[in-house]
Image (spheres, rainbow, N blue to C red):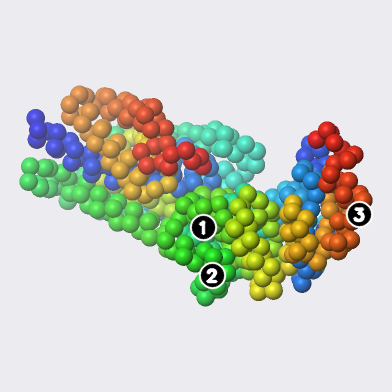
């Protein structure tokens, strides 16, 4: 029993890496634009399907799909940005409708192109088991967990050291003040969209490499990312990572101890629990509103 | 340098600024005074780009900036502070200035940053503290420092002394006195305290109910019966 729980914890942590990438993208865009991109999960899924296509048509490891996924997902994200940017009135609310609509269109487009069948990788290299003591994982899970950590470190560096990273933090922190300091808000928003879709591309390829994908999976990912962002209390990378690991572990424990049918429900319960007990999130500053 | 012509700003049916014309030269320190609700901050908002005027013109350095977005006006050299400080909370004090300098002035000059930090008494806080950790006096100083970092030609200060205790106020006054010379910047300052204004400014502009009622040297303006009336509220007692 103990071994089962340990194994669940381990798998949950590994899964959390990709969750964190998806959540960080959602949080970045929310930070600069105050828009919750409900099509974010579909962008991740798009990357996953590109990985599937590259693997099945060229017979290569899905990692080779990353450049193509980056290109297409970034282009799609830029398109989403310009559509959201067209909204001039009540953007925070109306963008929910718009991005939800885009999500539905993307889901259906994916279903049209790739059919509703469940897909998973056929790469033997990725599916090879890696055993660490009593714990087991697929090679792809470990590889992408490390990739996630590297990307998060890169994101942290970019946000704290680069000029556009600082501009993203400036606009997220005080939009008007940032503008008065000469920061172009629209350029900064666009940059945040692109960085979010870079993270989404990697997360999508990762999800395909160790799990199963289907067209309806996009909104599940969006909800997960949303839960994690609220758990973290917006704005800190370590916070998002911890939130993501927490969600991953909760899901894995639920699958192990109860049933995989309850997986999404467990995440929702965690979400409600945190909202009741710590409304500012696990790491949100108390009493300060955005 | 700044010329505001017949500027009006309306919010629904309310005319907050009513056909105001004024100018600020590069080598001037101009006070903007008037009772609460006179439209002073709204005028600042219109010039910096936060409020959309309903008519009139705003000429800065011979360019009509009425349609220019905020960030472009900042780049052109219009700097301002807010009465309620708006720092970039999550960034350190130095980062606040770096962002302002990189995006507002277009180039990074650490030496100038050090100079500004020194001048605004923020040097000890510079690298260590996130802006959200600062006390009110420091936040007010950061407002000025941020604006200075964008390398402005015009600096609009909105009640920088309000809410400070006496010693903080005195230190701030000393800083304001030097500001104009040291950074070669024209200043338009909103302030309630008449003594402060007389002390700092060569010229005073008085607004009342959105209208400009006086423009001239402080000792002259503050003797103007209409100005005195607007301040003591003789005519408008109870109407606010």
Cα separation between marks 3 and 1: 47 Å
Disc assigned to residue B118: 2
Which residue matches tag 1?
A: A167
Which residue matches tag 3?
A: B224
Q: From the viewer's perspective, is B53 left or right of B144?
A: right
Q: From the viewer's perspective, is B176 left or right of B139?
A: right
As drawn, which residue projects farthest toward the front? B166
**Image quadrant in which the N terminus of chain A is located:** top left
Residue B202 in sight? yes
The percent position of residue A108, horizontal first and vertical second, equals 44, 34
Cα separation between marks 2 and 1: 24 Å
Crowd rating for badge 1 (residues with CA inside 10 Å; few <14, some 14–19, many 20+): many
Instruction: Please say if the residues under marks 2 and 3 sit with CB atoms less than 8 Å apart.
Output: no
Instruction: Give me the residue at 63% from left, 49% from top.
Output: B163
Out of A27 and B81, give the one closest to the viewer: B81
Chain letter, disc 1 residue:
A
Crowd rating for badge 2 (residues with CA inside 10 Å; few <14, some 14–19, many 20+): some
Instruction: Give me the residue at 26% from left, 32% from top.
Output: A251
Out of A3 and B120, give the one closest to the viewer: B120
Instruction: Please say if the residues under marks 2 and 1 sit with CB atoms less than 8 Å apart.
Output: no
Instruction: Examine the image and state in which quarter residue B24 appears.
Output: bottom right
Q: Which of marks 2 and 3 is in front?
A: 3
Instruction: Please say if the residues under marks 3 and 1 sit with CB atoms less than 8 Å apart.
Output: no
Q: Is mark 2 on a helix, strand or loop?
A: helix
As drawn, B176 above or below A29: below
The percent position of residue A181, horizontal first and vertical second, equals 60, 60
């Amino acid at each position: 029993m103990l071994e089962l729980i340990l194994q669940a914890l381990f798998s949950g942590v590994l899964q959390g890496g990709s969750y964190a990438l998806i959540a960080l993208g959602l949080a970045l865009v929310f930070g600069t634009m105050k828009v919750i991109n409900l099509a974010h999960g579909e962008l991740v899924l798009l990357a996953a399907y590109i990985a599937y296509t590259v693997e099945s048509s060229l017979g290569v490891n899905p990692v080779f799909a990353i450049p193509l996924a980056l290109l297409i997902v970034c282009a799609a994200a830029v398109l989403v940005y310009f559509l959201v940017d067209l909204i001039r009135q009540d953007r925070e609310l109306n963008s929910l409708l718009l991005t939800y609509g885009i999500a539905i269109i993307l889901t259906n487009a994916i279903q049209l192109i790739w059919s509703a069948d469940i897909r998973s990788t056929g790469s033997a290299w990725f599916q090879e088991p890696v055993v660490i003591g009593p714990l087991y994982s697929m090679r792809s899970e470990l590889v992408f967990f490390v990739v996630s950590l590297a990307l998060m470190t890169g994101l942290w560096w970019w946000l704290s050291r680069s000029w556009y990273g600082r501009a993203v933090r400036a606009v997220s922190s005080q939009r008007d003040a940032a503008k008065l300091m000469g920061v172009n808000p629209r350029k900064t928003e666009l940059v945040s969209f692109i960085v979010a879709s870079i993270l989404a591309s990697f997360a999508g390829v990762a999800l395909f490499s160790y799990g199963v994908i289907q067209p309806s999976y996009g909104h599940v990912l969006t909800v997960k990312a949303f839960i994690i962002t609220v758990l973290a209390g917006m704005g800190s990378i370590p916070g998002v990572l911890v939130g993501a690991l927490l969600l991953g572990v909760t899901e894995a424990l639920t699958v192990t101890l109860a049933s995989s049918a309850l997986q999404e429900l467990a995440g929702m319960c965690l979400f409600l629990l945190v909202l009741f007990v710590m409304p500012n999130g696990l790491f949100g500053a108390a009493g300060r509103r955005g | 340098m700044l010329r505001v012509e017949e500027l009006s700003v309306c919010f629904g049916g309310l005319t907050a600024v009513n056909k105001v014309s004024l100018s600020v030269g590069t080598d001037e320190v101009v006070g903007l005074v008037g009772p609460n609700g006179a439209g002073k901050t709204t005028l600042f908002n219109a010039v910096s780009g936060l409020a959309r005027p309903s008519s009139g013109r705003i000429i800065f350095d011979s360019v009509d900036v009425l349609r220019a977005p905020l960030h472009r006006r900042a780049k052109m050299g219009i700097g301002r502070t807010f009465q309620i400080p708006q720092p970039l909370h999550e960034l350190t004090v130095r980062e606040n200035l770096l962002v302002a300098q990189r995006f507002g002035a277009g180039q990074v000059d650490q030496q100038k940053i050090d100079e500004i930090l020194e001048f605004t008494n923020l040097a000890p806080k510079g690298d260590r503290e996130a802006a959200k950790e600062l006390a009110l006096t420091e936040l007010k100083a950061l407002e000025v420092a941020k604006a200075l970092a964008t390398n402005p030609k015009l600096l609009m200060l909105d009640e920088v002394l309000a809410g400070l205790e006496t010693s903080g106020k005195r230190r701030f006054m000393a800083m304001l006195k030097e500001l104009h010379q040291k950074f070669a910047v024209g200043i338009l300052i909103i302030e309630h305290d008449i003594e402060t204004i007389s002390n700092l400014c060569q010229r005073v502009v008085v607004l009342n109910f959105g209208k400009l009622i006086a423009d001239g040297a402080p000792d002259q303006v503050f003797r103007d019966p209409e100005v005195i009336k607007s301040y003591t509220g003789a005519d408008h007692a109870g109407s606010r």
